[in-house]
Amino acid sequence: MAIKISKKNLDTEVNYEPALPQWFGITDETTNTKAGTLIRVQIPPRTKSSFHYHTNGDLFFFIISGTCIFEVGEKKRKEYVLEAEDFFYSPRGEVHSTYNPSETQPCEALAGYFGCSNPYKSGKVFVK
């Protein structure tokens, strides 16, 4: 059965990645899906996520507005600069971090995981 989920009816998720406000739109809790997730993410100016990887889900991002930089790799890191309307994919197990280089503009994005039904089931593992 189809379902509509309004962001205004979702709580802001502040525990999954504390520096990045998120709204878990499509998950097993909101739709009973088992296939994947869809999340609304805001990356505030000059904010960076911790380096981590996911054991149970492939990550995807779509940038709505602003700019963010993904750093990918455990030892030798590669940077991917993403701007509005860019897509990004990182397979499970790949170390990454997200950074907003802007002094003033947040980066707005849609993100999610293929292969897991909830961000908390993505097997997020933090690395130094």
Image (tube, rainbow, N blue to C red):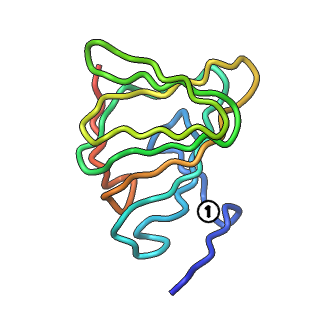
Vertical comparison of 36 with 106: above or below = below
Q: Position of residue 2 (x, y in %)?
A: 55, 82
Q: Quadrant of residue 51?
A: top left
Q: Position of residue 87 (x, y in %)?
A: 53, 40
Residue 48 seen? no
Q: Quadrant of the C terminus?
A: top left
Is residue 19 rendered to the left or right of residue 124? right
Residue at the image point whose x is 33% and y is 70% from the top: 34
Is residue 23 rendered to the left or right of residue 73? right
Residue 6 seen? yes
Q: Which residue bears the numbered disc 1?
A: 10
Q: Position of residue 100 (x, y in %)?
A: 60, 24
Which residue type carries mark 1? Leu
> From this viewpoint, which residue is outermost toward the bottom?
1
Residue at the image point whose x is 55% and y is 62% from the top: 25
**In front here: 22 or 1?**
1
> From this viewpoint, which residue is outermost toward the top?
76
Q: Quadrant of residue 37?
A: bottom left
Vertical comparison of 47 with 14: above or below = above
Mark 1, Cα crowd under 10 Å, few <14 / some 14-19 / many 20+, is few
Q: Which element is circle 1 on? A: loop
Residue at the image point whose x is 50% and y is 43% from the top: 61
Vertical comparison of 90 with 115: above or below = above
Q: Position of residue 125 (x, y in %)?
A: 27, 36
> From this viewpoint, which residue is outermost toward the right?
104
**In front here: 10 or 101?**
101
Q: Please tell me how many numbered marks the rendered image carries.
A: 1
Residue at the image point whose x is 42% and y is 27% from the top: 97
**In front here: 62 or 53?**
62
Vertical comparison of 123 with 104: above or below = below
> From this viewpoint, which residue is outermost toward the front?
86
